[in-house]
Image (tube, rainbow, N blue to C red):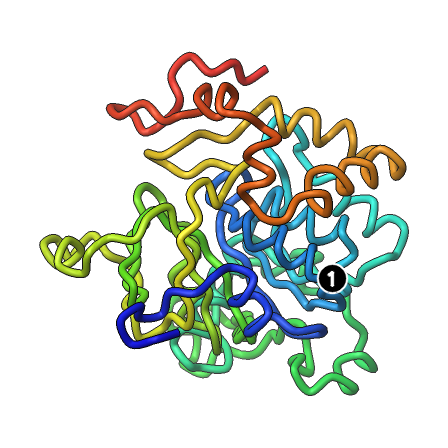
Amino acid sequence: MDKDSGKIMALDEAIRTYVKDGCHISIGGFTVNRNPMAAVYEIMRQGIKNLHCYAHSNGTGLDELVGGGCISKLEIAYGGNGKAAPTCIRFRSAIQKGRIQCEDYSNYHMSLRFHAGAMGVPFIATRSGMGTDIVEKWGFSRQMRESDPLLPDKKLEVMDNPFKGWGGASKVLLVPAINPDVTIIHVQKADKFGTCRMEGLSFCDTDQAKAAKNVIVTCEEIVDTEALRTTPESNQLPFIHVSAVVPVPYGAYPSACYRYYDYDPQYLSQHSKFAKDDGLYQAYLDKFVYGVKNHDGLLNLIGKEQLSRIAADKRTGYAANLDRR
């Protein structure tokens, strides 16, 4: 990177620089919304393995990383691709066949864990989850935790309320912070230094970014810094948290990017059919992921006609008259 380009990097360079075999990684987005798909496919093409992944409630990004054999350990609340796959198929298969180790939390727990990481505190106390199996059932054993210095000693901890029952609670549940080596998010707009603007729901992306040691931001477009400064209240992530900025139009495809394009129901439906069969899924990967050089190659396979169908309506931010069956 040179001074004039700020933090702008090519996607392959950003992934090669910050995502290593065995690192702890977090990906942003929520189910079929704003998954950093261009970055996910680049991780797969570079053959990066043994990732420890954290996800709030992810979709295609999670499923592809699992299906591509990139993830060995996962901490997550939920993985689904909407109607096409209420539970992500390669994710579910990997769990059932014991190909990855997984520990589950509630959506709220994962939000709190990223928030604790962003705050720089080791844990956050809550009452949510008390009395549920989430507390009792661990995905990672004590022995595994002892052998990995990056894992907390316990999944969760129930403790007496130190404030003598203030708030009506005799006990509270402590959830451990998450501090990934790298978080990858996709946003609508960013300047060359990394100040980000997410339009629509931001999900947990801001805390996921602030909790990480390094942050890769892919974006639909690079805009002038002054344009973001005119309405600073609309920006969610300041440049100080960002390591690399990568302009990638359609970088969330086939998931949605609000006000730019909708998710592609046709692609996701076909993906679900392929994902149910190991042979078909491998053929899919060979064509759509490993068979193209970059994300532009994938978009060329999809074609301009299909991309025009999912283009966002300027008034609503979603595709008008899109057949979602």
* SS state under label 1: loop
Residue at (70% x, 40% y) in the render: 88
Question: Where in the figure is residue 79, as x and y percent of width and height?
Answer: 64, 45
Is residue 99 shown left or right of residue 305? right
Structural crowding at the residue carrying mark 1, measured as other residues with C-alpha within 10 Å and reported as few (<14), some (14–19) or many (≥20): some
Image: 65 above or below 140: above
Q: Which residue is drawn at 32% across and 29% down?
A: 317
Question: In the figure, is residue 107 to the left or right of 101?
Answer: left
Image: 313 above or below 321: below
Left or right: residue 270 versus residue 122 is right
The quarter of the image holding the C terminus is: top right
In this rendering, position of residue 244 left or right of residue 235: right
Q: Which of 173 and 17 is in front in this view?
A: 17
Q: Where is residue 97 in the image (x, y as percent from the top left)?
A: 90, 51
- Picture quadrant of residue 50: bottom right
The part of the image, by quadrant, that contains residue 137 is bottom right
Question: Which quarter of the image is occupied by the N terminus?
Answer: bottom left
Residue beneath the point at 60% across and 53% down? 40
> What residue is pinned by disc 1?
47
Q: Answer whether residue 174 is visible to the viewer in this image.
A: no
Q: Residue at x 19, y 56 (%)?
A: 224
Spot the residue most to the left.
230
Question: In the image shown, does 176 or 207 lie closer to the viewer?
Answer: 207
